Image (cartoon, grey):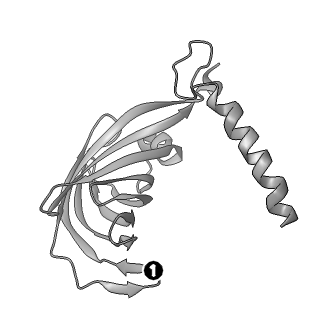
Amino acid sequence: MLFSGVVSPLLFSILASSAKANIFEERSDRALPFNFTYAFTAQLNLGKPLPPINITGGVLNTEPILNGTVTGPAINATVTGGIATPSIYQNGIIQVPTIQVWGITSEGYGFVINELGIGSPKGQVTRIQLTIGGLSKKYQALQDSYVLATVNPNKEQTKVAVQGYIVGNAASYV
């Protein structure tokens, strides 16, 4: 009880003091610590999902990725296959997708994309890691970058649009 007696007043004072300042207000004296650069759009076609697998607190879906395209200033490629295995919790409200796709770049190099994220059935935010074969330095910066993406399935759950953005640290450009 002593712990809750100390924490509650402390938590209340923190919340009360933070309520005085709007943390969402736009301020010109505070620059964002990161910037985002558009990298690519992927259009993926999904196959028929396998039956759900029961896991603690929810289910795990297995959804084949049949094919697709990746287009943008950072990479152009053809997706030849993949798999999405979202874990679904809270009566379908929360999804934790794990996604892997593979294919060939427009220059003929093989690639693998791994994604992990969180969201809802209507869309998720993921971190993407790319591995691209070949000796081309063209893709080195993309492979070394921190890439965030939005994953948005259509209503029928037959197609997915992925928008990828390279996250840059604004301080590194100073």
Q: State the image coordinates of residue 129 (x, y, percent, origin top left).
A: 46, 55
Residue displayed at 52% across by 22% down:
25
The picture quadrant where one finds residue 102 is bottom left
State left or right for residue 108 relative to residue 166.
left
Give the quadrant of the N terminus.
Answer: bottom right
Kindly identify the residue that appears in the image at 28 percent across and 37 percent down. Answer: 72
Q: Amino acid at mark 1?
A: Gly
Residue drawn at 36 percent across, 70 percent down: 86
Q: Which residue is painted at 34% across and 47% down in the image? A: 150
Q: Where residue 65 appears, x then y in whole percent?
A: 23, 67
Residue linked to disc 1? 57
**Side of 22 relative to 149 (left or right):** right
**Can residue 78 be seen at all in this image of the molecule?**
yes
Residue 122 to residue 33: above or below: below
Residue 18 lies, in percent from the top left, at 66, 32
Compared to 71, does 28 lie above or below? above
- Residue 96 visible to the viewer: no
Please, is residue 16 above or below residue 81 in the view? above
Q: Quadrant of residue 62?
A: bottom left
Viewer-proximal residue, 103 or 45? 45
Towards the viewer: 82 or 62: 62
In the rendered image, the quadrant that contains the C terminus is top right
